[in-house]
Image (cartoon, coloured by chain):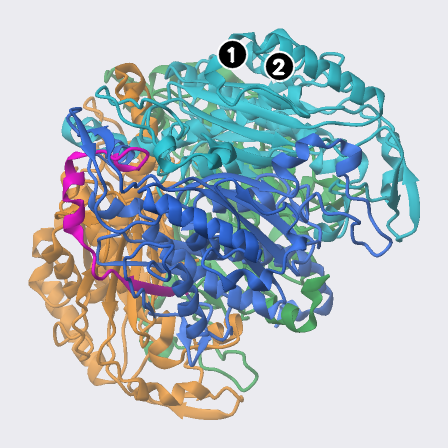
Chain colours: A blue, B cyan, C orange, D green
Amino acid sequence: MNTFGNIYRLTTFGESHGTAIGGVVDGMPPGIVVDIDFIQGELNRRRPGQNPLTTGRQENDQVELLSGIFEGRTTGTPIGFIVRNEGQHSQDYEELRCLYRPSHADYTYQQKYGLRDHRGGGRASARVTISRIVAGALAKLTLRQLGITVQAYTSQVGTIALDHDYSRYDLSLTEQNNVRCPDEEKAAEMEALIRQVKAEGDTIGGTVTCVVKGCPAGLGEPEADKLHAALAHAMMSINAAKGFEYGDGFSGLALRGSEQNDLWTSEGTTQTNHSGGIQGGISNGQDIYFRVAFKPVPTLLKPQATVDIEGTPTVMKARGRHDPCVLPRAVPIVEAMTAMVVLDKILQNLPIKNFFLATNEKSLKK
Amino acid sequence: MNTFGNIYRLTTFGESHGTAIGGVVDGMPPGIVVDIDFIQGELNRRRPGQNPLTTGRQENDQVELLSGIFEGRTTGTPIGFIVRNEGQHSQDYEELRCLYRPSHADYTYQQKYGLRDHRGGGRASARVTISRIVAGALAKLTLRQLGITVQAYTSQVGTIALDHDYSRYDLSLTEQNNVRCPDEEKAAEMEALIRQVKAEGDTIGGTVTCVVKGCPAGLGEPEADKLHAALAHAMMSINAAKGFEYGDGFSGLALRGSEQNDLWTSEGTTQTNHSGGIQGGISNGQDIYFRVAFKPVPTLLKPQATVDIEGTPTVMKARGRHDPCVLPRAVPIVEAMTAMVVLDKILQNLPIKNFFLATNEKSLKK
Amino acid sequence: MNTFGNIYRLTTFGESHGTAIGGVVDGMPPGIVVDIDFIQGELNRRRPGQNPLTTGRQENDQVELLSGIFEGRTTGTPIGFIVRNEGQHSQDYEELRCLYRPSHADYTYQQKYGLRDHRGGGRASARVTISRIVAGALAKLTLRQLGITVQAYTSQVGTIALDHDYSRYDLSLTEQNNVRCPDEEKAAEMEALIRQVKAEGDTIGGTVTCVVKGCPAGLGEPEADKLHAALAHAMMSINAAKGFEYGDGFSGLALRGSEQNDLWTSEGTTQTNHSGGIQGGISNGQDIYFRVAFKPVPTLLKPQATVDIEGTPTVMKARGRHDPCVLPRAVPIVEAMTAMVVLDKILQNLPIKNFFLATNEKSLKK
Amino acid sequence: MNTFGNIYRLTTFGESHGTAIGGVVDGMPPGIVVDIDFIQGELNRRRPGQNPLTTGRQENDQVELLSGIFEGRTTGTPIGFIVRNEGQHSQDYEELRCLYRPSHADYTYQQKYGLRDHRGGGRASARVTISRIVAGALAKLTLRQLGITVQAYTSQVGTIALDHDYSRYDLSLTEQNNVRCPDEEKAAEMEALIRQVKAEGDTIGGTVTCVVKGCPAGLGEPEADKLHAALAHAMMSINAAKGFEYGDGFSGLALRGSEQNDLWTSEGTTQTNHSGGIQGGISNGQDIYFRVAFKPVPTLLKPQATVDIEGTPTVMKARGRHDPCVLPRAVPIVEAMTAMVVLDKILQNLPIKNFFLATNEKSLKK
């Protein structure tokens, strides 16, 4: 429904033009210092209007944390939070009452619920990802204590693509440009392409690659909730996501088994990492990496033929302010979802990991 | 953990060399006629030894349904079932006690649980997919009553690939050849490649495409359990799966938004189906289709360098009987998982769909 | 964790002296008219300071609904809501930093989380039931459309008890007095007792009885989530609840099977209702009724011996404003939890109920 | 549906006259030595025909464990198990095709599912508790390693009742008599009463009290899954259960708060235990105790008036072999459900308990 995760859980609410977007983080470990500036900073990375490549909408997206924190630390009880919707131009969407936009969720919501909030995409708006950024930031603060980092970057826009091998790039450069691509040259090409597409009133898709470093071995359930299945589920739940692959993924199909196997070293590491850090659904201690495809957003600033809700043909042209390419703003969302999944799996795994430790040390007893 | 689904749920158990593989199907709708021959037929499509392209292991895989059925119909109570393991050659795996096979789950299970059943891959064996075939067959029997069909086929082996557009193929031809590919010419090429790879003691991967026809609009949850996210999760939980895409997927990245949008017709259908039958995570009534990448299986019949559990370098060479390519046997598993997801989403959606119907007609009252 | 229900789900957050109490209702059926005055009215029934029998604290408890509503109707998407905490006197609780109050959750929270918000009981405060009132009110609005009513009343205070048979009382009189008891004479006795106990600086417990009328047959899961098990879980989750019984319950132990069996009539009803409207965990269409025991609240206005967190003996005496008896304010909470459970079970049951109806009528198809 | 628990989970299947009863235990900690004789011994405590007070049916109830065990230890993967149904006399129940037995689940199953397996009560038979005994025995083996014991006993039959205070009894005497009551004198009275009721073709109810010793503080979720709420849910899911109370429960209503509060000692224990070892839904390290009421079983060997499924009045008289009183056989079921809940809560709590420990010691990292 509207809940992500098993132990570390986020339940979200809100639509584009409602009163507020928000959620509840349950399962937050107690005692974590809450760095509110970091959380707001993550929201700012997602915010529209942050640079010329994104929509011109100006949204402040100030988060208010409502519970679960005492004297600057998490208490282990749920953290409720809201971000109020402000400056929504609902009248920009008035004609959508009677229209189903192509490749949008208007028709499907109407079919599912029998009614819909047509303003700004309602619950299907990418604005709802705000909640995930907040929960992801709290997860990142926790992972940081465990020495685990999550870094994503734009790896493809249209057909301009980076190499599959993330280790060739210095990921600390990702935030240096508007597209969030660690290769400056490719970043410039991508930016030029996005500007051109925008000028045409069109849109373009691409991919985000994400890398998790420092993740312990043993995370993931072997059958129904393999680590990569959980990651795929999380990534495909992001608006506009169309594909997921980890390790060699689709590009590995050209290789034989003998070329793709990751041979062990005497140190308990692998010589290569075609597996993407996961074997049999469980992390093996190597870097975890995967790639997510995002389609071109379907909202165009040039005219499109469609039908109204009576089936009468008409022509629509988006008003309002829209992104020509979601990739730069998708990067922090991919990171947030990844951090949530990894923390959830760590918390799921701790009972197994520590059961005998606890038993033997009798630390369980008091 | 070991449970798939929300309303239509499968909980599985069993390892390769234990006493039996089995599971419990919960949420089965009452009154469905149980066609045991159909269920066994689906198991036979997955069974090893069915043709020269698969492993030479001969396993009967006879299913025994233990509950939830009365006078030939489902009762709505859970269906327990088992398939006994027979003719396992546990001694073939004795050396794995002290070895971690490359790109297998040996090391990760050891890390997660502190001990492992090394025989035949234990719980990580593809043999555990038997349970999914049974639950998928029961789901198919239910979907059949609703006029919904699920058909998968091998769409790529190595670099030999079919066209992305499934509508170019006659899917009724899929079962006519050993690779389960509806294009006879490509099927012959694929078969030749698999034979060659097998002769080299090596393995090869590929993709399966799956198409769902007749699915009503309105299935899928808008936020955390989008229909394609649920499909991705299910597919990535299949052994050896490395990637998932639906609709245009990764290949759509070359297109602009104006090329990828599916314009509406006056009849409430779409002129194209780049969306893959899903918009905003909810089915729109068009065909649903997606593609899954499977890696080359890591078990090779030629020698590989590895280390034992003490870290000492050694060379291993698989004994036993293994598949050079999982694709042909993956086809029924993809179908089974798809049928389970679609039925689950139908059952999840019925309360919303029927709530006011029920209210108005007072049919709820008795 | 902090989520109630399966299909109709409430996730709560908030502590007594945090910024706000709130929650998310997921699974709300679409199209329900939201009567905000009704919801606020239910909150007012729970509010402290409503009459001389309750705590003197004045809290406004104004609810703000943040999402999931469009043009006055529910949309089927989650409803987030908050009630801000105002006028909390945190300094009244300063000494609790270093004390564990007898029979309170101070010590257990400290043991569980390693730290705690000592102010006003933190997350363990009865103030958190505000979220349940809101979700219960939304459930009641939905049940009303189905002709289902939920009515609770105070049936015992101390040893002053009503008859077990609810049908002897006119439940419409419940709100006529301060204790919410439909028997005016007993109500007066109960009120006198509460005033006396209050004057002594002491507290007293009692029971609430709840009756559901108009509930269709067929609700409840047969094994793990029997209807009465779900009700017991919900009731025992209310602060200060110590016992639950349905139908004859504990008092039926004096009867033989032949005296307790409910014989059928030719009209498909039962001659008696010892079963409490539930057989084998599933509703049978008769009135559902049950009783919940609440202990005397442990916060006393007279001195009690205890130890501080260092183990040093000390004497404590509550400051602040506290209820001498929770019963009157527990009545709306019992109703709210009951409404949530019944709606949840209706939504769980609709797929089974309507599956073949849907199939046969092809109404599922569009 | 048919799954109990969160981390330690039991999914059950089977009906009285189907092929087998069984289930899947998921979340079993790895490395536990599986004492199969102990598990079978627990089944024998539940088995019918064990002594003159129970039904004369002879059922062997031999359990077969099918997976999740390797070289005598649990592996952490799911444990599937079955107990075959043998010697069922289905013809004894033929007339139930057309009858709804009073206070049985015949009518409610028919209403819920539209069809039912009438033989021996089908899924509603107490025979399905076999699965819980197996899962409970595995939980007990695990708890034993942690020094936690679970002991239940018959505390009331009809109106013959033990004292509320369990500490007055030597629980090691429980298995010394047919009624499983630790007070020999009362046990003899209870046995006489059951024999008399049986001779009359009637039935009688009673209560089971259960005590958990050695349980660490900190177990239970503070809001939706309080420890006593989880226990209430588990107990009320047992066939014929009608009521639940913990600590002082209903009998505490005669006391004031000042009489019921458990004052702390300097040693971090409480002077009294009216709370039943749980405060705010979380264990406090003292003994946990609670009481469950069971109704007289509705199957009588003397004639009862009822109606057939057409509504025509008729008289029924049970054939077959039935218990006059479920209490003696309910004792091991109460213990099994309790052990499952306690282990589940321990596993849920370990991540919180060990998070910082793990962080600080870096034990999480490898």
Q: Residue at x 71, y 53 (%)?
A: A286
Residue A145 in which image quadrant: bottom right
Q: CA distance from mark 1 to mark 2?
A: 10 Å
Seen from the viewer's position, the closer of residues C270 and B360 is B360
D246, above or below D123, in the image: below
Crowding at mark 2 (Cα within 10 Å: few <14, some 14-19, many 20+): many
Do marks 1 and 2 share a chain?
Answer: yes
Chain-order first, disc 1 or disc 2: 1
| A87 inside magenta stretch | yes
Residue B180 has which mark? 2
D156, above or below B323, in the image: below
Mark 2, chain letter?
B
Disc 1 residue type (three-letter): Leu
Disc 2 residue type (three-letter): Arg
Seen from the viewer's position, the closer of residues D79 and D249 is D79
Q: Residue at x 14, y 61 (%)?
A: C40
Q: Position of residue B195 (x, y in %)?
A: 78, 16
Q: Is residue C296 left or right of residue B318?
A: left
Residue B171 has which mark? 1
Residue C135 has which mark? none
Q: Residue at x 48, y 37 (%)?
A: B253
- The kind of secondary structure element at disc 2 is loop
C5, above or below D300, in the image: below
Residue C3 in which image quadrant: bottom left
- Magenta-highlighted residues: A78-106
Q: Position of residue C45 (x, y in %)?
A: 15, 64
Q: Position of residue B277 (x, y in %)?
A: 38, 27
| B261 inside magenta stretch | no
